[in-house]
Amino acid sequence: MTPTDPTAPAPGAGTDPSTAPEAVARAFEELYGSAPEGVWAAPGRVNLIGEYTDFNEGSVMPLALPHTVVAAVSRRTDGVLRLHSANAPDPAAALVELRTAELAPRSGGGWAAYPAGVLWALARAGHRAVLDGADVHLASTVPTGAGLSSSAALEVATALALDELYALGLDRPGLARLAQQAENAYVGVPCGVMDQMASACCVPGHALHLDCRDLSTRQVPFDLGAHGLRLLVVDTRVQHALGDGAYAERRAGCEQGARELGVSHLRDVPYDTLPDALARLGDERVRRYVRHVVSDEQRVAQVTALLGAGTPEALRAIGGVLTAGHHSLRYDLRVSCPELDLVVGVANAAGAHGARMTGGGFGGSALVLVEESAAPVVGDAVRAAFDRAGHRAPRIFDATPSAGARRLG
C-alpha cells in the first residue's frame, strides 16, 4: 500500500475563510449593526518541551501555531459587555450580554468566562476604562480540548483588542499576566503563564524559550525543514478539561514538594541533587511530581542546547528527549491517556525520532519528530492503530512556528 500524507493543513490552520479578517468584521457588522473598530488575532500553541514546569517558575519552549482566535471588537459607553462566538457549541448560547460592573469570578460561565474574565482582570488591575464595555465577535480555528491552548488564544486576542482600543499601554508580558489572572481567578483554572506568553510573544520561525520566573524570553530559531525534518501534531480528539481538579491536584503536590525541600519553587532544585532531594520526601506521589518537574527542566536545557548546536545530528537527537519527557509525564506525573500513549508507541515503532504528549494531558495532542520522507508512513501507522483500537481518527498536521498576537485590521 502506498503511504498517504496525513499532514495536509488541519481545518482552520490559517485557511478557513470564515476567520479571514474581512469575514469576521462582516459578521460583527451583521450582528451588532456597525463595523468593528478593529480585528485582532491570537494563536494557539504547542509546547516543544517543559510540561508542568511553568507554575514551578521553570523554563518552557512553546511555539505558536497558525490556528488562531480572531476577535472583532468595538468599545461601548454604557457598561455592557456583549460577547458572541461563531464556535459556541450551543447556538442558543452564542451571544452573551453582561454588565461590566457586575462581573465576578466564574459569573459568565462557559466559553464567555474567558473574555469576560479578561475585562474583569484588566479592571481589577486599575484599567477601569474597560468598564465602559465592548462588543466582541469571536471566530476560532484553534481546536478546543486538544491541549493547544484555545483558552489562552481567546484571552490574549481579547486582551490585545482592549489594550489597544482603550490605550492601556500594556507590554506583552504584562498583557499575558493579566490574561493568566483571568483564567486563574475568574475561570478557576490554576494554569501557569506559558500559554498566554506563547500566544502573546511568539514570532514566526522560532520557538520561544521562556523563563517563567522573570518572564524573560529568547527567540530560538526553529527550522526543522532545512534539515529534512518535520514536527507533527497528532490531535487524538480526546477532549480534556483542566478545571476538573486533576491539574490543580498536581500543582498542589508540586507546591508541597517545594515546601518540604525548603525552596520557593521546584525550579530551585538542581538536577544533579535530585536523588538526594527525592530521598527527603516521604510521600510517593509528591516524589513522582518532583522527579518529573526537575527532570523536565533539565530536558528544556537539553533541547535548547541541541537547537543551538543546529547540526542535523543534534536536531534529530531532540527526538530522544521528547520520548523521555513522555515517559516522565506518563509514569511520574500520570497525566497521559491510552490514546496519547498509542501515538507515541506507534510513531516511534514506525520510525519517528521521538514523540511525546504536549499540554496539560488527560487527552489532547502529541508531538512527533520525524524525517520529512517518513511522515506519511508514520501518519498512516498512527491512523491504522487508532482504527484497530476503535478510536476516532486523529487529526495530524504540521507544527509550523507562526506569529503571536497581532492586529489584522
Image: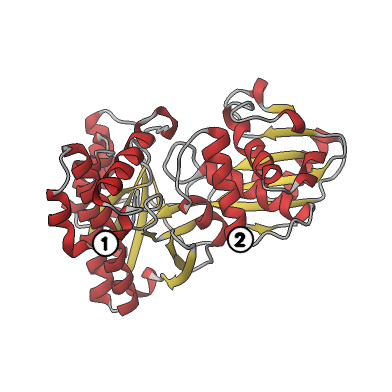
Of residues 300 and 125, the one nearer the viewer is: 125
* Mark 2 residue type: Arg
Which is nearer the eye, 131 or 29?
131
Q: Position of residue 409 (x, y in %)?
A: 75, 57
Residue depicted at 60% across the width and 26% down the height? 109
Does residue 107 lie above or below 6 as drawn? above
Question: Which one is in front, 147 or 302?
Answer: 302
Q: Quadrant of residue 286?
A: top left
Q: Residue at x 25, y 39 (%)?
A: 384
Above or below, 54 against 298 in this view is above
Q: Is residue 386 above or below residue 51?
A: above
Across and down, in percent, residue 118 comes to 64, 42
Res. 92 in view: yes
Q: Which residue is mark 1?
A: 299
- The colouring scheme, among rainbow, by chain, secondary structure or one colour, is secondary structure
Vertical comparison of 106 with 384: above or below: above
- Left or right side of 174 for 224: left
Whole-percent x, y for residue 25 in the image? 77, 46
- Amino acid carrying label 1: it is Arg
N-terminal of the pair, mark 2 or mark 1, is: 2
Residue beneath the point at 82% across and 44% down: 75
**Contact (Cβ within 8 Å) of mark 2 with mark 1:** no
- Residue drawn 81% across and 46% down? 36
The residue carrying mark 2 is 172
